[in-house]
Image: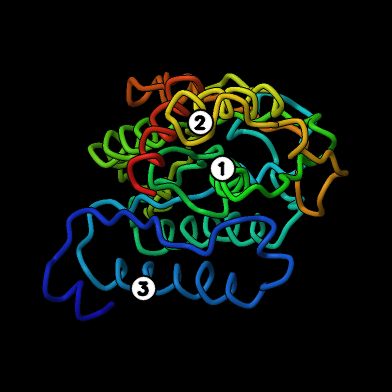
Amino acid sequence: MDGLFEKYHFDVVVNLAAQAGVRYSIDHPDVYIESNIIGFYNILEACRHNPVEHLVYASSSSVYGDNKKVPFSTDDKVDNPVSLYAATKKSNELQAHAYSKLYNISSTGLRFFTVYGPAGRPDMFYFSATKKLVEGQTIQIFNYGDMRRDFTFIDDIVEGVYRVMQGAPEKKNGEDGLPIPPYAVYNIGGGQPENLLDYISTLQEELVRAGVLSNDYDFEGHRELVGMQAGDVPVTYADSVALERDYGFTPKTGIREGLRAFAEWFAGYY
């Protein structure tokens, strides 16, 4: 890491690397500490010792836990995580704040809301469910389908990250002569939570349309409704007003368009 920073003299650093996922953190907590806490610390130290203008990093909607107030706002208190993954992402925000205050490093955290699309993470539900259906296996639908998610298409995430890269939080000093932390956190989500069962039905329709599954596929025979899984939450819902205000952007891609792009990619790739 030190060698890369010394050689390339980065102006902007975008850290998207992490061990992701709520469920995996239940059985493999050590890798979350190694990647998300120590790994992010290494990024911060590199920014500290090199003249970086702006650090942009991935946080997660998971930091909101089972917050009952919706939509989720970055002004909400998020001190009660329900998974280790969420705790590590909130820790990243705290680490960044400390380094922004101590070393006047401009940093912006982005809380991503259920990102999906072509070439996505194979452990995400839409991707793993597709593979299981293709293989004739049964998919498990948690909380008996009574879940709502603010799904965000990958192209919208990329656009949001790119825009935030262009404008770092302003550096200025307080009355004590010390830096006021040039620090910000934004939600990136569509602000339109979708019912999980509707999302699954749309996915199935698009998989048939793309020729991944046959027209007569027995979807009902390959579904199993099960209870809530530890670490999960029943709803995510982004308030992205601040992102729109400061960067003129809000995710717009609907699930039909997004899942169609995924299904067509899946058909071509596999």
Which residue is label 3 attached to?
Answer: 45
Residue under the point 11% across and 75% down: 7
* 2 vs 3, front mark: 2
For this view, does 127 lie left or right of residue 9?
right
For this view, does 121 lie left or right of residue 86?
left
Which residue is label 1 attached to?
Answer: 130
Q: As shown in the figure, which amino acid type bears the numbered disc 1?
A: Thr
Say which quarter of the image contains residue 5.
bottom left
Question: Nearer the N terminus, badge 2 or badge 3?
Answer: 3
Q: Crowdedness of circle 1 by 10 Å Cα count: few (<14), some, many (20+)?
A: many
Q: As shown in the figure, which amino acid type bears the numbered disc 3?
A: Glu
For this view, does 139 lie left or right of residue 208?
right
Q: Position of residue 180 (x, y in %)?
A: 42, 48
Q: Crowdedness of circle 2 by 10 Å Cα count: few (<14), some, many (20+)?
A: many
Determine whether the residue tagged by mark 2 lies in a helix, strand or loop.
helix
Which residue is label 2 attached to?
Answer: 207
Q: Where is residue 208 in the image (x, y as percent from the top left)?
A: 51, 27
* 1 vs 3, front mark: 1
- Whether residues under marks 2 and 1 lie with C-beta atoms below 8 angstroms apart, the answer is yes
Determine whether the residue tagged by mark 1 lies in a helix, strand or loop.
helix
- In space, the residues marked 2 and 1 are separated at their CA atoms by 8 Å
Q: Where is residue 77 in the image (x, y as percent from the top left)?
A: 70, 40
Instruction: Out of 232 and 58, give the one closest to the viewer.
Output: 232
